[in-house]
């Protein structure tokens, strides 16, 4: 049975700025841990641990290509967050629409 990755796991992984930066780098394509470590003042081992957290949250998958282990971003957990946020987005859009209507009605009244 496949492991169900929760929004909690995804948000926990995204809570760290280094992990968010790693995901940002992976938007450009696959990379090895050594390549991911280059812009950071962290060891390759520390970056590997961050990649492991991202992998456990389903945000990254690793594969082997020749002598390299490559990491790749997985978008499904981010889509899950987007779906979860959609209800809140609709709520706020409705509230802003009502506020806009009220402001328009108030602007149409003579003083």
Image (spheres, rainbow, N blue to C red):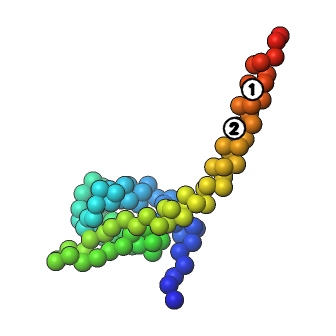
User: How many numbered marks are there?
Assistant: 2
Q: Secondary structure at mark 1?
A: helix
The label on residue 96 is: 2
Q: From what the image shows, is residue 84 above or below residue 45?
A: above
x, y percentage for residue 58?
A: 45, 72
Q: Quadrant of residue 66?
A: bottom left
Residue found at the very far left of the displayed protein? 66
Q: Quadrant of residue 48?
A: bottom left
Q: Give the residue number, with chain letter if any, for mark 1.
A: 103
The residue under the point 28% across, 60% down is 29
x, y percentage for residue 36?
A: 28, 61
Q: Is residue 103 visible?
A: yes
Q: Earlier in the sequence, mark 1 or mark 2?
A: 2
* Residue 46 as seen in the image, left or right of residue 110: left
Neighbours of disc 2 within 10 Å: few (<14), some (14-19), many (20+): few
The residue under the point 53% across, 74% down is 5
Q: From what the image shows, is residue 41 above or below residue 70?
A: above
* Residue 41 as seen in the image, left or right of residue 50: left
The residue under the point 69% across, 38% down is 96
Looking at the image, which is closer to me, 64 or 104? Answer: 104
The label on residue 29 is: none
Where does the C terminus fall, quadrant-wise? Answer: top right
* Residue 41 as seen in the image, left or right of residue 8: left
x, y percentage for residue 14?
A: 48, 60
Looking at the image, which is closer to me, 17 or 68? Answer: 68
Q: Secondary structure at mark 2?
A: helix
x, y percentage for residue 44?
A: 27, 66
**Disc 1 from disc 2: Cα separation:** 10 Å
The residue under the point 24% across, 78% down is 64
Q: Is residue 49 visible?
A: no
Q: Circles 1 and 2: CB distance less than 8 Å?
A: no
Residue found at the very far bottom of the displayed protein? 1
């Amino acid at each position: 049975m496949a492991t169900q990755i929760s929004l909690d796991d995804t948000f926990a992984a995204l809570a760290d700025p280094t992990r968010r930066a790693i995901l940002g780098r992976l938007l450009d394509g696959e990379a090895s841990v050594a390549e991911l470590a280059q812009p950071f003042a962290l060891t390759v081992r520390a970056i590997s641990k961050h990649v492991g957290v991202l992998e456990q949250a389903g945000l990254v998958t690793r594969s082997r290509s020749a002598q390299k282990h490559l990491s790749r971003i997985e978008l499904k957990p981010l889509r899950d967050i987007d779906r979860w946020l959609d209800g809140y987005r609709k709520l706020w859009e409705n509230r802003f629409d009502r506020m806009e209507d009220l402001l328009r009605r108030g602007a149409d009244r003579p003083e």
